[in-house]
């Protein structure tokens, strides 16, 4: 199954974002990004089990700095 990754700017944002999304009913987990670029900050991503668009908006609404989204399956 294809999963999008929500890339955040630090491990702190990744942990806060994961916990926030779990409190909103998502199955969320973090992973160290592979092949990171300078713009990825520390290179951590948050994965969710469904509705990545909604998850990203929740993060933004709670001031979690989202760097970008990357498609899964690659």
Image: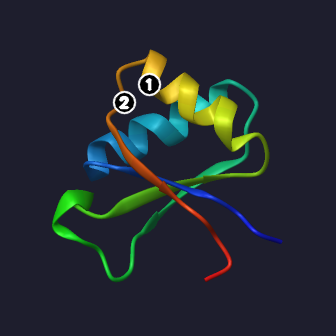
Measured as percent of width and height from the top left, residue 53 is found at 66, 36
Quadrant housing residue 20: top right
Measured as percent of width and height from the top left, residue 71 is found at 60, 65
Q: Viewed as shown, does residue 7 lie left or right of 51?
A: left
Q: How many marks?
A: 2
Q: Residue furthest top?
A: 61
Q: Is residue 22 in sight in this rendering?
A: no
User: Pointer 1 and pointer 2: residues touching (CB < 8 Å)?
Assistant: yes
Instruction: Quarter of the image for the C terminus: give it.
Output: bottom right
User: Which of the labelled discs sits on residue 51, or is there none?
Assistant: none
Residue at left offset 68%, top offset 43%: 52
Quickly name the residue at label 2.
64
Q: Is residue 65 in sight in this rendering?
A: yes
- Callout 1: 10 Å neighbours few (<14), some, many (20+)? few
Residue at left offset 26%, top offset 48%: 9
Instruction: Quarter of the image for the N terminus: give it.
Output: bottom right
Measured as percent of width and height from the top left, residue 58 is found at 56, 23
Residue at left offset 79%, top offset 46%: 50
Is label 1 in a helix, a strand or a loop? helix
Q: CA distance from mark 1 to mark 2?
A: 5 Å
User: Eyeballing the image, is 40 above or below 54?
Assistant: below
Instruction: Please name the colour scheme applied to the rendered image.
Output: rainbow
Q: Residue furthest left?
A: 38
Residue at left offset 46%, top offset 36%: 17
Quickly name the residue at label 1.
60
- Callout 2: 10 Å neighbours few (<14), some, many (20+)? many
Is label 2 in a helix, a strand or a loop? loop
User: Eyeballing the image, is 51 above or below 47?
Assistant: above
Q: Viewed as shown, does residue 54 lie left or right of 49?
A: left
């Amino acid at each position: 199954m294809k999963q999008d990754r929500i890339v955040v700017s630090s491990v702190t944002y990744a942990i806060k974002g994961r916990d926030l999304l779990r409190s909103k009913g998502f199955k969320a987990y973090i992973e160290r990004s592979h092949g990171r670029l300078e713009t990825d900050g520390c290179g951590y991503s948050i994965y969710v089990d469904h509705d990545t668009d909604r998850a990203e908006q929740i993060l933004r609404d709670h001031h979690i700095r989202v760097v970008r989204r990357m498609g899964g399956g690659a």
